[in-house]
Image (spheres, rainbow, N blue to C red):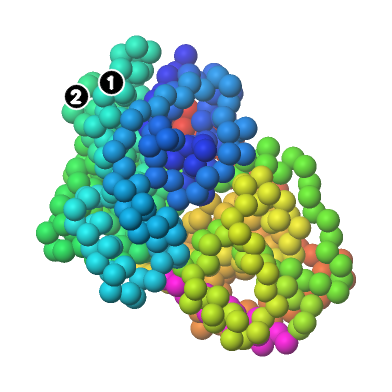
């Protein structure tokens, strides 16, 4: 039997996108006769950005979960500044233009490299060694962010003769909000050196897109392309077993966005295009965390909008299915072509079309075309966005809504992706 220790900071009861990938992949690995061990942080010590207890239902009964202690500096900061002022994904919940927030970002980035969750490393390494020896485990997978998790793998590789697979869900020093972290030249150099060490000393690297693979591959000349495997984010077929598609009335057309939307995403052209539609029957539904600046912009346009606070993941899939069109916004930053959010695949699994805002040469646009699941528009295409929305409204009225290519979509199921992981092991 193959055995693997997956080291992941985010694990239920943590919520958010970061927990989904290995929660789902580990389930299907366990189903395929792999002995799966998870090492994660003690929830009582963790500094999660959100909680979703419903995700515990997805932990396969054969999986053995191990917890370790941690020293979480963010917990102390949240007590002083208030939990609402602790940055969440993409820094969408804080005012990044304020002097105080800039100072906090700089303090965070220059004292805690690569991130404030590095206090977990010492405890995780000790626990991992115990697990590896007790269960005779030969392979470990470290997944990040937080990228301090990769330093755990680096230490284990140094101490033990073990197969180390790195999983990068996001870029490290090229993440779209990296400038907001306000590194000094010295701290940025240290961060880059750690990133390069992980890339060079690991045995295998998995990442979620070809664009991200290129980013990491260009960090060093010592690593060949063959070291990398691209396994995108995906969807869990179990989340869509119960079809929740209740056709909204002909009189209403629901456009839904789920997840975090920060100012760095630059979604404003879409709202302008929606405003040009001049249709009272269009409802924009935003589920999750949205920056204050974006909310203000939508308010000024007087769009018909409904904000829904973060909900359990099981409810998100139902909301996605009950919409007519799903909005995906790729952050407006350099090297954004490789960004493929996990929600993209759940959007497609819902059966609805996706309208994406971002580069037309992106991995997202390629996947949407492959699955006949929508279209990507550049931020200069306001009139084309308006025409696309009108076209889908017409096709809904005529009962001629586009169909997803189910065969192409199946390649992105967590079950199929887990088989790729099993082969790597």
**Residue 32: x, y in percent?**
56, 23
From the image, tell me which residue sits under label 1: 129
Check the image and report above or below for 110 versus 70.
Answer: below
Q: Callout 2: few (<14), some (14-19), or many (20+) C-alpha neighbours within 10 Å? A: few
Give the side of residue 320 with respect to residue 80, left or right.
Answer: right
Q: Is residue 342 magenta?
A: no
Q: Residue 87: which numbered mark, if any?
A: none
The span shown in magenta is 263-278
What residue is at 31 percent from the left and 24 percent from the top? 128
From the image, tell me which residue sits under label 2: 159
- Give the label, 1 or 2, closer to the camera: 1
**Residue 284: x, y in percent?**
68, 72
Label 1 or label 2, whichever comes before in sequence order: 1
**Residue 336: x, y in percent?**
41, 65
Look at the numbered discs 1 and 2 and tell me whether their residues touch, using CB distance below 8 Å.
yes
Position of the C terminus, as image quadrant, is: top left
Residue 348 visible in rendering: no
Give the side of residue 391 with respect to residue 340, left or right.
Answer: right
Check the image and report above or below for 174 versus 342.
Answer: below
Dot 2: element: helix
What residue is at 33 percent from the left and 30 percent from the top? 69
Q: Main secondary structure of the magenta part?
A: helix
The residue closer to the viewer here, 15 or 162, is 15
What residue is at 48 percent from the left and 21 percent from the top? 64
**Residue 178: x, y in percent?**
30, 62
What residue is at 62 percent from the left and 47 percent from the top? 312
Q: Does the magenta stretch include residue 264?
A: yes
């Amino acid at each position: 039997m193959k055995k693997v220790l997956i080291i992941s900071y985010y694990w239920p009861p943590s919520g958010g996108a970061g927990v989904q990938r290995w929660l789902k992949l580990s389930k299907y690995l366990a189903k395929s006769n792999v002995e799966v061990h998870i090492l994660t942080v003690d929830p009582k010590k963790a500094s999660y950005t959100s909680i979703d207890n419903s995700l515990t239902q997805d932990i396969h009964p054969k999986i053995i979960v191990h917890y370790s202690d941690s020293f979480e500096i963010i917990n102390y900061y949240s007590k002083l500044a208030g939990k609402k002022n602790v940055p969440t994904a993409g820094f969408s919940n804080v005012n990044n233009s304020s002097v105080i927030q800039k100072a906090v970002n700089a303090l965070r980035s220059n004292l805690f490299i690569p991130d404030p969750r590095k206090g977990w490393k010492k405890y995780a390494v000790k626990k991992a060694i115990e697990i590896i020896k007790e269960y005779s485990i030969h392979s470990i997978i470290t997944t990040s962010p937080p990228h301090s998790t990769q330093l755990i793998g680096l230490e284990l590789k140094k101490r033990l003769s073990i197969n180390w697979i790195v999983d990068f869900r996001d870029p490290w020093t090229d993440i779209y909000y990296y400038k907001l972290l306000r590194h000094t030249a010295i701290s940025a150099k240290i961060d880059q050196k750690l990133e390069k060490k992980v890339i060079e000393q690991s045995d295998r690297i998995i990442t979620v897109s070809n664009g991200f693979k290129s980013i990491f591959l260009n960090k060093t000349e010592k690593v060949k392309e063959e070291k990398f495997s691209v396994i995108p984010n995906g969807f869990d077929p179990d989340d869509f077993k119960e079809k929740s598609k209740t056709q909204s009335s002909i009189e209403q057309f629901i456009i839904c966005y789920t997840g975090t939307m920060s100012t760095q995403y630059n979604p404003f052209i879409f709202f302008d295009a929606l405003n040009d539609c001049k249709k009272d029957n269009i409802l924009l539904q935003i589920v999750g965390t949205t920056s204050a600046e974006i909310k203000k912009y939508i308010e000024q346009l007087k769009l018909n909008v409904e904000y829904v606070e973060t909900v359990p993941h099981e409810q998100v899939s139902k909301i996605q299915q009950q919409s007519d069109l799903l909005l995906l916004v790729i952050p407006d930053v350099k090297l954004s072509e490789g960004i493929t959010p996990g929600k993209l695949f759940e959007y497609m699994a819902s059966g609805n079309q996706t309208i994406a805002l971002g580069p037309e040469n992106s991995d997202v646009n390629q996947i949407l075309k492959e699955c006949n699941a929508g279209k990507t528009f550049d931020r200069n295409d306001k009139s084309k966005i308006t025409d696309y929305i009108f076209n889908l409204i017409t096709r809904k009225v005529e009962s001629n809504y586009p169909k997803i290519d189910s065969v192409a979509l199946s390649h992105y199921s967590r079950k199929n992706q887990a088989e790729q992981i099993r082969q790597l092991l």
